[in-house]
Image: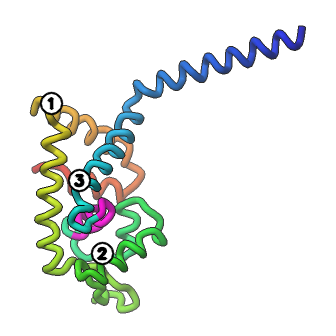
Amino acid sequence: MLGIASTLAAEEIEINMSINRLELLHTLEYWIEYSARVIERASNELLIQHGITYRQVRVLAVLIVRGPISQAELAERIQVEPSTIVRVVNRMERDGWIDRKSDPVDKRRNMLVVTPMAETIWETILKCAGQVHVNAYEGITQERLESTIQTLSDICMNLSHDNPSTSDSIEEAQPE
């Protein structure tokens, strides 16, 4: 009798897991994460032709929007471990896209700043992003796109009250 009960319990668990997997496909979190990966992959396919990676784009975007910041602040902004960002920053510095400058307030700390060369790179990035947007938004009305952006912005604001660095990023990204 115990064997039948355990078999039924195992089958019930398997059925519940299947249902949970199907429910997952209908969650906003799933589609946000999946869409982000698809957009990153499509972006990388275009960017790599110019020797640029998506992570480098994220670094430049933060530096262009925020201005000079420390490497630790940069890692926090793009939500990666500080050790992960070291290789990206070193490569970008080697290629002349960014410089490390002494912080005028705290001489022990270096600030990352974009170079004039990064402006040329940024133009290429914008062209690639434009192409990804054209492909991604095909068949989507402006109204639906704006509604989606507003909804996602609202979700971020709702969830970022306890995290000042996230709140700052969201407020900077808000359209005027």
Q: Residue furthest right?
A: 1
Helix, strand or loop at label 1? It is: loop
Measuring 37% from the left and 31% from the top, which residue is drawn there? Answer: 28
Query: Local crowd at mark 3 within 10 Å, few (<14), some, or many (≥20)?
Result: few
Residue 172 point in image, percent of width and height: 21, 57
The residue singled out by tag 2 in the image is 69
93 or 154, which lies in front?
Answer: 93
Measuring 27% from the left and 52% from the top, which residue is drawn there? Answer: 170
Residue 149 point in image, percent of width and height: 21, 39
The residue singled out by tag 3 in the image is 171
Query: Please, what is the three-letter code of the amino acid marked with disc 2?
Result: Ile
Q: Are marks 2 and 1 in contact (CB under 8 Å)?
A: no
- Give the magenta range: 53-63
Q: Residue furthest bottom?
A: 107
Q: Name which quarter of the figure residue 77 lies in.
A: bottom left
Asked if the stretch drawn in magenta spans residue 9, the answer is no
**Which label sits on residue 140?**
1
Query: Please, what is the three-letter code of the amino acid marked with disc 3?
Result: Glu
14 or 70, which lies in front?
Answer: 14
Helix, strand or loop at label 3? It is: helix
Q: In the rendered view, would you say 37 is above or below 62?
A: above
> Depth-wise, is mark 2 or mark 1 nearer the camera?
1
Distance between mark 2 and mark 3 Cα atoms: 18 Å
Q: Name which quarter of the figure residue 36 lies in.
A: top left
